[in-house]
Image (spheres, rainbow, N blue to C red):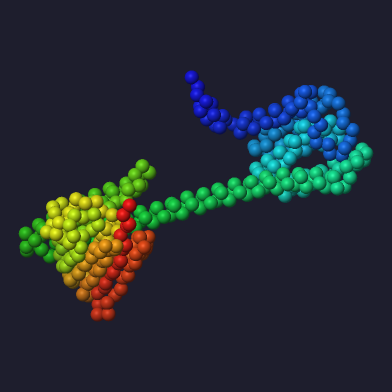
Amino acid sequence: MIRPGQILDRWRSSDVVLRDLPFPLLLAVASLVPALHVPGTQLGDLPTRPLDALAIAIVALECLPLALRRRWPAGCLALVSFGFALDQLLGYHTVAGIALPVALLSAGAHLERHRRTVAVVGSAAYVLLAVALDQLGSTEGFAGFVTFYLVLAVAWGTGVWLRQSRAAEAERRRHVAESTRIAERTRIARELHDVVTHHVTAMVVQAEAARYLSSAPERLDQTLAAVSDTGRRAITDLRHLLDLLDPDDGAEPVPSSAGELRALVERIRRAGHPVEFTEEGSPRGAIGSGGAIGSGGAIGSGGAIGSGGAIGKAELAAYRVVQEALTNALKYAYGIRTVVLVRYEAAEINVEISTDGSRSGASQLGGSGRGLAGLRERVGLLGGELSAERRSGGGFVVRARIPEESPE
């Protein structure tokens, strides 16, 4: 059994001519059925003529082209106008005269080209019709013809306004779609930089260090194990990043828990870079009030959960700030002490990463500036601030203030 909803769907998907056909058919019937016959448009006030076989043809010429009003608006207007002129000149004055303003409105709304030409030709044709009616003894007068012309002009103008509104809405939607696409590409590029650059930099530094450890097999084995671990971590993060491209999964690749921050620092240390890491306070949602975050999911000395708690937007932003700063330290200050301080306060997280200097012999990995720019955008969207400055005596310092989300 066909449901009403299915019938409506089939109707909406049918050809536009078929969907536009019922109105002209109803208008033609209303114009020809004697019981429904009433005097229609009477431009020129000529004596009304009884309906005959010719009237049927004229009504058909006026009404039926309306089925093409969206597919062929110029042709529809021309045929309807010709039928209207015959209707008025012969004095039938049928209800089918309504077709002319409808055709004008449709032409104004759907005509894509030569609109000015159509308007000029239509105005000239109306002047000729007015002159012909006057020659046949019309008592309409100049004011009457001008008034009817203004009515037709309003119909045309309404169609033009509808077309412009439709075009403006389409442009707005296109702009929104383009802005959304650019924002998504920027977000993916930012995440790609945050995830891949960090791991690849660590792997390059570790591999370079391994070249000089041939005489120390134990340290060489540890370094190669660190390279392997970093590579596996990079693959995992890349898989999360690729999920961004899945339209059914808009999840952002994020650390699984707040405890990942300590694991991040530990990986940098395993790469041979000295890092002093201090946490003050606890992330929002952690149990306890001041313990350090562990890396294995156990509850630390202050009661904070290690890797078991979910991470919020502010914690993720803090993680990315530390990640980017440590990556830059590996690039430009490898082997020089780096100090990381993360302080959790009631309403915000404060992060500070600093190095004591830089070395000209550090890994020559060029920087594009995309990382810090992306971090400023990320932190700014949360209402925070980020600064990155070089120290006068060498080195750099990165500071970030990241407001916590208000609890629901």
Name the residue: 34% across, 62% down. 379
Name the residue: 24% across, 51% down. 310
Outermost residue toward the top?
1
Q: Is residue 108 left or right of residue 298?
A: right
Residue 66 picture quarter: top right
Name the residue: 84% across, 30% down. 92
Number of callouts = 0
Q: Is residue 116 above or below residue 139?
A: below
Residue 168 coordinates in the image, percent (x, y): 58, 51
Q: Is residue 315 left or right of residue 59?
A: left
Residue 76 coordinates in the image, percent (x, y): 71, 37
Q: Is residue 166 left or right of residue 317?
A: right
Q: Is residue 396 above or below residue 116?
A: below
Residue 232 coordinates in the image, percent (x, y): 20, 51
Residue 335 picture quarter: bottom left
| Near-viewer residue (35 or 93) | 35
**Residue 200 visible to the viewer:** no
| Near-viewer residue (24 or 390) | 24
Name the residue: 36% across, 63% down. 383
| Near-viewer residue (314 or 69) | 314
Residue 309 coordinates in the image, percent (x, y): 21, 51
**Residue 291 visible to the viewer:** yes
| Near-viewer residue (211 or 189) | 189
Outermost residue toward the bottom?
393
